[in-house]
Amino acid sequence: MNENTIKGNWQQIKGNVQKKWGELTDDELDQINGDRKILAGKIQEKYGQAQEEAERKIDEFEQSY
């Protein structure tokens, strides 16, 4: 799944994102709007993870989706 696919399917995917990263609020999910960099930043902020770790978690999520 590439970034264009995430953006194009964000409305369907964001429920799964919220299940995976439950600390993200609906407002934050709306702000993310399928943007991988913003998602990584929010994961870093909420979960105290390094950028590389957040990116790895997103990669894993994409492969499971």
Image (spheres, rainbow, N blue to C red):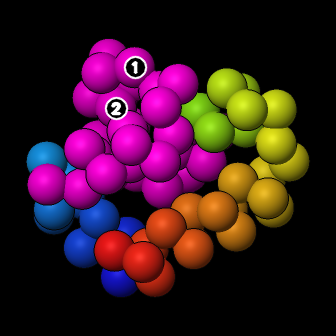
Q: Residue at x 56, y 63 (%)?
A: 58
Distance between the Cα atoms at labels 2 and 1?
6 Å
Most common secondary structure along the magenta stretch: helix
Residue 31 in the figure: left or right of residue 61: left
- Secondary structure under tag 1 reads loop
Which three-letter amino acid code belongs to the residue tagged 2?
Answer: Leu
Q: Quadrant of residue 62?
A: bottom left
Quadrant of the snapshot with the N terminus: bottom left
The reply to whether residue 35 is visible in this rendering is yes
Residue 40 in the figure: left or right of residue 30: right
Residue 40 in the figure: left or right of residue 21: right
Indicate whether 28 appears above or below 38.
Answer: above
- Asked if labels 1 and 2 touch by Cβ distance under 8 angstroms, the answer is yes
Residue 15 in the figure: left or right of residue 1: left
The reply to whether residue 4 is visible in this rendering is no
Which three-letter amino acid code belongs to the residue tagged 1?
Answer: Thr
Residue 39 appears at what percent x and percent y? Answer: 51, 44
Which numbered circle lies on residue 29?
A: 2
Residue 3 appears at what percent x and percent y? Answer: 37, 70
Q: Residue at x 51, y 40 (%)?
A: 21
Residue 65, magenta (yes or no): no
Which numbered circle lies on residue 25?
A: 1
Indicate whether 51 appears above or below 60.
Answer: above
Query: Which contiguous range is marked in magenta?
Result: 12-41
- Secondary structure under tag 2 reads helix
Q: Residues within 10 Å of mark 2 (few under 14, many from 20)?
A: many
Q: 65 and 10: which one is in front?
A: 65
Q: Quadrant of residue 44?
A: top right
